[in-house]
Amino acid sequence: MAGSHPYFNLPDFTQPSPPSTPPSLLSHQCCQPSNATKGLLVALLGGTLPAGFVGPFSHTAYQTSHLPSLGLLICRCLFHLPIALLLKLRGDPLLGPPDVRGWTCLHTLLNVLSIGCAYSAVQVVPAGNAATVRNGSSTISSALLALCLESQGLSGYDWCGLLGSTLGLIIFVGPGLGTLQEGTTGLYTAMGYVLAFLGGLALSLGLLVYCSLNFSSCLLTVAFLFGLVGLVGSVPGLFLLQTPVLPSDPLSWSCVGAMGILALVSACVSYVVTKAHPALVCTVLHPEVVVALMLQCYVLYETVAPSDIMGAGVVLGSIAIITAQNLSCEREGQVEE
């Protein structure tokens, strides 16, 4: 055979040649965004942008009607309860499968604690600073967890972007932490930063727990349980620890409604951790700080320091590194031999 000649490697024209693939289809098969890239884009568009509006809206509702943090949490939980109708139509149990019900409730509890701490923080510190500390805490916590989980390692580019984003958050909030006032005002401000930090820690733990959940209606179930668990815990706490207040003007009602809808949309972040590492998901959420900063400057008319702008630039540059590295092409549909 000519194809097996020891000196020549000529094609065997007696065999039919395989059908040729059009160049457009070949390029489409060769260059497809990976699942991690798709997940990070969902987190960026579906989680970051809506979540960036939630903090300023919560701050505005508190300033106009003095709505307490638990009251805001109750309003948000009410938007999650109608998801029970979807679960009933699908024929799924409201509390999830019995074998993972405990983990599902744990994830929901951590998520409620994270949101509750965030709402409490934005009432005593600027929305941008609260979002900065919360995102930085969640990222650092997720990175430390990544060191303990060998099966979920990060590449060098990912670590570079993660550390750069954390540096940007430090530049963002560092000068404010160094100028805390003494007395009651400074104590409340420090408590606000502590609550924001605890909210980020609870967020990272909740995302890690969500990675262990694997059933068809997982996202819908945890969204409904967020509303249920949040109401069960917030209603008694509102009457015991705070003073119940209803929105007193159309602006407050509008902020509460927009906050609930946007927060419901941003719940897709939990699903993204099944596609990408939790540390990367938390890092991609950092532009929420930039969105909150813009609203803080142009809507709430609060002062923005040069360090805030510098930190925002470092955060965006770090996100660009992670995004560029994860926009790798993976070959799909390879030809079977």
Image (cartoon, grey):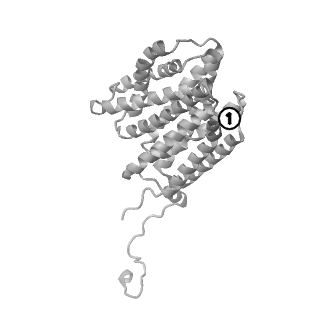
Q: In front here: 120 or 215?
A: 120
**Relative depth, front residue between 280 and 301:** 301
The total number of labels drawn is 1
Q: Compared to 47, does 90 lie above or below?
A: above
| Left or right for 277, reference 286 | left
Q: Nearer the viewer, residue 205 or 24?
A: 205
Q: Identify the residue shown where x is 55% and y is 18%.
A: 68
Please determine whether, in this image, residue 15 is positioned above or below residue 298. Answer: below
Residue 174: percent from left, percent from top: 62, 41
Quadrant placement of the N terminus: bottom left
Residue 202's spot in the image, x, y percent?
45, 34
Identify the residue at the far left of this view.
Answer: 99
Question: In front: 330, or 229?
Answer: 229
Secondary structure under tag 1 reads helix
One can see residue 276 in this view: no
Residue 37 position, x and y percent, is 50, 48
Q: Quadrant of the C terminus?
A: bottom left
Q: Is residue 204 left or right of residue 72?
A: left
Q: Give the vertical position of 37 relative to 231 (above or below).
A: below
Mark 1 neighbour class, 10 Å CA radius: few under 14, some 14 to 19, many 20 or more: many
Residue 51: where, in percent of width, then height? Answer: 56, 32
- Residue type marked 1: Met
225 over 238 or under it: above or below? below
Q: Residue at x 64, y 44 (%)?
A: 311
Residue bearing the label numbered 1: 294
Residue drawn at the location 42% of the way across and 46% of the way down = 145
Q: Quadrant of residue 44?
A: top right
